[in-house]
């Protein structure tokens, strides 16, 4: 089943985000290589694809996991969480409707 991992960043966490980014991306690449990643990316803090020093306000990941517990465990091990980037993370079941 698909799960949405919705994270909200701590204020002023851009430096921590940049430092933890390689480890964060490695985990996403592993999901992609397993064919389980639907989409992933950050929410720019301003209305721009490149927010510069404004940074990001959070992230969204949609991926396949065996169950909610497995998705939560994966999310709990995110390097952004350990680095203090995320202040809140929600994991919810996700039903894909479009695109088909």
Image (cartoon, rainbow, N blue to C red):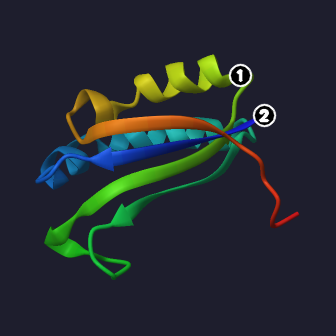
Residue drawn where x is 17% and y is 70% of the image = 54
Secondary structure beneath dot 2 equals loop
Residue drawn where x is 59% and y is 26% of the image = 71
Residue drawn where x is 78% and y is 53% of the image = 96
In the picture of the structure, the residue carrying the numbered disc 1 is 67
Secondary structure beneath dot 1 equals loop
The answer to whether residue 43 is above or below residue 59 is below
Q: Is residue 23 visible?
A: no
The answer to whether residue 94 is above or below residue 23 is below
Residue contact at pointers 2 and 1, CB within 8 angstroms? yes
Total numbered labels placed on residues in the image? 2
Q: Quadrant of the C terminus?
A: bottom right
Earlier in the chain: of badge 2 and badge 1, it is 2
Q: Quadrant of the N terminus?
A: top right
Q: Position of residue 18 (x, y in %)?
A: 23, 51
Q: Position of residue 92 (x, y in %)?
A: 60, 37
Residue drawn where x is 40% and y is 39% of the image = 24
Question: Is disc 1 surrounded by few (<14), some (14 to 19) or many (20+) residues within 10 Å?
Answer: few
- Residue furthest out toward the bottom: 48
Q: Nearer the viewer, residue 36 or 66?
A: 66
The answer to whether residue 33 is above or below residue 59 is above
Q: Is residue 75 visible?
A: yes
Question: Is disc 2 surrounded by few (<14), some (14 to 19) or many (20+) residues within 10 Å?
Answer: some
Q: Position of residue 51 (x, y in %)?
A: 26, 75
The answer to whether residue 75 is above or below residue 21 is above
Q: Nearer the viewer, residue 77 or 67?
A: 67
- Residue furthest out toward the right: 100
Q: CA distance from mark 2 to mark 1?
A: 7 Å
Q: Is residue 23 left or right of residue 99?
A: left
In the picture of the structure, the residue carrying the numbered disc 2 is 1
Q: Is residue 18 left or right of residue 3?
A: left
Q: Is residue 14 left or right of residue 31?
A: left
């Amino acid at each position: 089943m698909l799960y949405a991992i919705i994270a909200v960043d701590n204020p002023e966490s851009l430096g921590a985000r940049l430092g933890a980014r390689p480890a964060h991306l490695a985990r996403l690449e592993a999901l992609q290589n397993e064919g389980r990643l639907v989409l992933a990316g950050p929410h720019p803090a301003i209305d721009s694809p490149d927010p510069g020093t404004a940074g990001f306000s959070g992230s969204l990941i949609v991926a396949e996991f065996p169950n909610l517990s497995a998705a939560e465990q994966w999310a709990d091990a995110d390097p952004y969480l350990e680095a203090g980037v995320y202040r809140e993370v929600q994991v919810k079941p996700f039903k894909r409707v479009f695109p088909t």
